[in-house]
Image (spheres, rainbow, N blue to C red):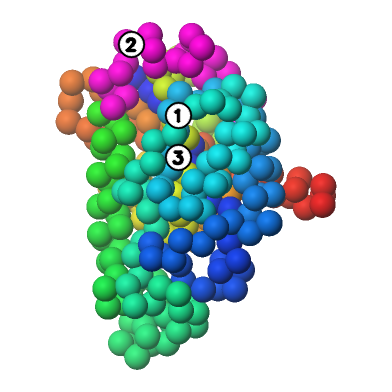
Amino acid sequence: MMRFALTVVRHGETRLNKEKIIQGQGVDEPLSETGFKQAAAAGTFLSRVKFTHAFSSDLTRTKQTMHEILKNTKFCKDMTVKYDSRLRERKYGIAESKALSELRAMAKAAGEECPVFTPPGGETLDQVKMRGKDFFEFLCQLILKETGQKEQFPQGAPSNCLEASLAEIFPLGKNHGSEFNPDSGAPELVASVLVVSHGGYMKGLFEYFVTDLKCSLPTTQSKFELTSVSPNTGISVFVVNLEEGEVVRPAMQCVCLNLQDHLGKMTEAH
């Protein structure tokens, strides 16, 4: 068995986020001033984590967030980022660039609830979830393929350093069932992956983790929290356990979901 950590961060705030305008894939709005500050704060919070891989949606707001995060880290400033269209936000069709209130009105007119309503030209929730599944299975296969290659660790960092760097900022311990526990007897991490994506997409991805892969949640959180969209730059961390040579259906544990501790510190600082 091999293990890797997956840290997923939502992009920082845009002007349209604040104004409750639907962006989806067709409106490529940059970060607002607040969004840049949020992304920098997330980078400072994650500054000592040793990531081995970085993936981002190819939209401007996620690219800028990833850049700000890495710029504020200690070990990953010069990491190569892979931009992947599978990490894009849900496509909202004719509702893109319209107010959230208009989307709700469309859903009501169709006799549906807003979260499950698909505007004409948009993606269904299942299609978004399948995009998440496709990316995640690609990621698992990549980690399996790279395991054993010395090049997988930046600057020759041994795998126990990956674990220790996460344990520094996610000290959840035995009481929370954390995987970052030196006495757990679990194999050391072979990789630590950073992903920057979008609120709607992340909600679909996390639903896949919990519903399909039976990912366990910390004792302090419940499945109900999966129904909430992550705040801007909310941080979620998972540990993925892979069996080498088998069909990808890993055992997963959620360490934290939509964490926003860094945003409180940002508020205090400003």
Q: Which residues are magenta?
A: 142-171
x 34%, y 43%: residue: 84
Q: In the figure, is residue 88 to the left or right of 257?
A: left
* Location of residue 229 with respect to 211 vertically, above or below: below
x 82%, y 52%: residue: 270
Majority secondary structure of the magenta segment?
Answer: helix
Q: Give the alpha-carbon distance from disc 3 to disc 1, as whole Å.
A: 12 Å
Of marks 2 and 1, which one's residue comes earlier in the chain? 1
Q: Quadrant of the N terminus?
A: top left
Which residue extends farthest bottom?
Answer: 109
Q: Which residue is mark 1?
A: 80
> Between residues 32 and 255, which one lies in front from this camera angle?
32
| Residue type beneath disc 1 | Thr
x and y percentages locating residue 56 in the rendered image = 43, 43
Q: Which residue is mark 3?
A: 195
* Location of residue 258 with respect to 247 vertically, above or below: below
x 29%, y 70%: residue: 122
Q: Quadrant of residue 5?
A: top left
> Between residues 9 and 249, which one lies in front from this camera angle?
9
> Between residues 155 and 4, which one lies in front from this camera angle?
155
